[in-house]
Image: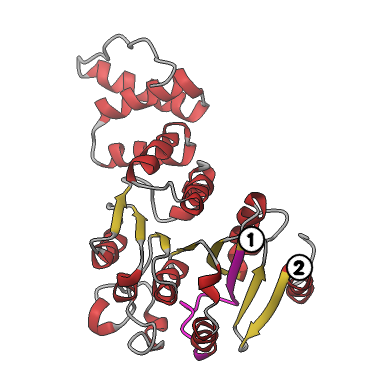
Amino acid sequence: MRDLDNNDWLSRIEEIGELEGYFEPLGAAHAALFADRGPVLLVSFETRATIRTRSEEQLPLGFTLAEGAEHSSLTLIAKEESWFRDPAVYAYFDRLVDEAFFEDFDRVVFYGAGSCGYAAAAFSVTAPGATVVTLAPQATLSARRASWDNRFLRKRRLDFTSRYGYAPDMLDGAGQGYVVYDPLQTLDAMHAALMARPQVTLLPCRNLGRAVETALSEMDVLEQMLVQACAGTLDAASFWRLYRARRNSPRYLRGLAAQLDARKRHWLEALLCRNVVHRLGGPRFRNRLATLEAQLEAQGRALPAPLPLREHA
């Protein structure tokens, strides 16, 4: 599907909707794709650009994961970054509530990242008891509550004060909520703090970076996290077990090395590079290790003998 233009791609998504359940435009900027497969429902919020660049198939992440597990899926698709602040989207969820749509499922999971994470939290109020998984979400872009976030100045004209507006308040009805973010990304951490609720678990992942969804997907953590959420087995302990995969993630390891370099912690950086070289190889870390060892030797410091690597360290 790589060579399809936007119109052809959208036609293909409509065809899938007709086969699996339905496809419904929601105004000019949003759409809903529903696939009816089983008693578990994964509700995901995604943008067209993210869907089209994620994989060769160019299918929504929520649709693909749910299909593999024979779960139902409801994907809300935005033409562009909109935070889903659209009366047509509000009306759609109002209708789902009136039809008791979510009551037909044994378990409902809402998922989104960034602006889509905001939407997952905000609209989860329509399915009380749902599990909500969000990655680096914004709590709001309202200037009154988040004037400190200057990343999306043009989007402040969107209405975050009316219906489904303040995402943290909308989480009050969730059964469980999970917010994954990098605490070193100050603005993401501030939004995460606003999302804190008794039933919401904050999962701070240092050195994960700004592209949280991409990083977790590359580690194969995101997909497994959502599988566990749909199975009702996700908790903080299971997430941290999954997150051990960061030890083999080039993106994460490069970010960690860059942090140590910026803080001039060259001794620790050398230990990190040596560990990576011994376990994974890689010319970038090998070259950096040689440079650091030369610097440390010039200072009269030498790295200790490496410890034997444990198979499941």
Please report the residue visible at 54 percent of the width from the left and 86 percent of the height from the top: 95
Verify whether residue 127 appears in magenta: no
Please report the residue visible at 35 percent of the width from the left and 27 percent of the height from the top: 272
Residue range of the region highlighted in magenta in the rendering? 73-87
Asked whether disc 2 touches disc 1, contact meaning CB atoms under 8 Å apart, the reply is yes
Q: CA distance from mark 2 to mark 1?
A: 10 Å
Tell me the element at label 2.
helix
Please report the residue visible at 58 percent of the width from the left and 63 percent of the height from the top: 50
- Location of mark 2 (residue): 16
User: From the viewer's perspective, is 51 left or right of 17?
Assistant: left
Residue 137 picture location, percent across and down = 38, 65
Residue 298 picture location, percent across and down = 24, 18
Identify the amino acid type marked 2: Ile
Residue 21 picture location, percent across and down = 71, 71
Label 1 crowd bin: few (<14), some (14–19), many (20+), radius 10 Å? many
For the C terminus, the image quarter is top left
Label 2 crowd bin: few (<14), some (14–19), many (20+), radius 10 Å? some
